[in-house]
Amino acid sequence: MTTDPIRKSIEVPLPPLEAFDLFTQKMETWWPLESHGVGADTGAPSSTIRVDQEEGGAVTEILPDGKAARWGTILEYAPGEAFRMTWHPGREERDATQVSITFRKAGNGCRVELVHDGFARHTDGVRAAHIYAQGWDHLLGILFARAAGRLISA
């Protein structure tokens, strides 16, 4: 195992702007907050993820009690092209990694490429990278792809 960046890519049958919007502004429609959210262990999972539409903005999970759990800070917000953020759901900001997603026209849809980096500076970086590599396979490769209209075969 290694702390090299995690790289995942898929093609979906949406134009880049629609794929970008699904990933950012409609995240709660495909992200499994009941298992992959800060509020997942409370017995009452969250139902809302808010993504500010500007660099310097935040990505937050709105907990059932109305409090916001910050997942990260937006470093790049280019609709239809790229989204980049620090990533620290449930952790301190100083422990943040970085997630970058690009959206490029490909055939009748778009290629979505994700890079998750910054594990090397953590004491548990190898373990975290391994867990996130598997998590992104499920989150991007199955749940996001299905929400984008891509057929997933068994």
Image (tube, grey):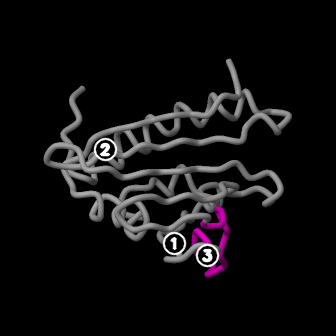
- At 45% from the left and 67% from the top, the residue drawn is 78
Q: Could you give the CA–CA distance between mark 1 and mark 3, rounded to whole angstroms? A: 8 Å
Q: Nearer the viewer, residue 112 or 136?
A: 112
Circles 1 and 3: CB atoms closer than 8 Å? yes
* Residues shaded magenta: 58-74
Would you say residue 71 sits in the magenta stretch?
Answer: yes
- At 57% from the left and 34% from the top, the residue drawn is 6
From the image, tell me which residue sits under label 3. 57
- At 83% from the left and 56% from the top, the residue drawn is 94
Label 2 element class: strand
Give the class, few, some or many, for how many residues have Cα within 10 Å of label 1's Cα (few <14, many ≥20).
many
Mark drawn on residue 51: 1
The picture places residue 79, in percent across and down from the top left corner, at: 39, 68
Please determine whether, in this image, residue 41 is positioned above or below residue 2: below
Give the class, few, some or many, for how many residues have Cα within 10 Å of label 3's Cα (few <14, many ≥20).
some
The picture places residue 48, in percent across and down from the top left corner, at: 48, 71
Looking at the image, tell me whether mark 1 or mark 3 is earlier in sequence order.
1
Label 1 element class: strand
Would you say residue 8 sits in the magenta stretch?
Answer: no
Q: Amino acid at mark 2?
A: Arg
The picture places residue 125, in percent across and down from the top left corner, at: 76, 33
Magenta region's main secondary structure? strand
From the image, tell me which residue sits under label 2. 111
Q: Could you give the CA–CA distance between mark 2 and mark 3, rounded to whole angstroms? A: 25 Å
The picture places residue 83, in percent across and down from the top left corner, at: 49, 60
Circles 2 and 3: CB atoms closer than 8 Å? no
The quadrant in which the N terminus is found is top right
Q: Nearer the viewer, residue 11 or 124?
A: 11
Give the farthest residue toward the bottom. Answer: 66
Q: Nearer the viewer, residue 101 or 138?
A: 101
Looking at the image, tell me whether mark 2 or mark 3 is earlier in sequence order.
3
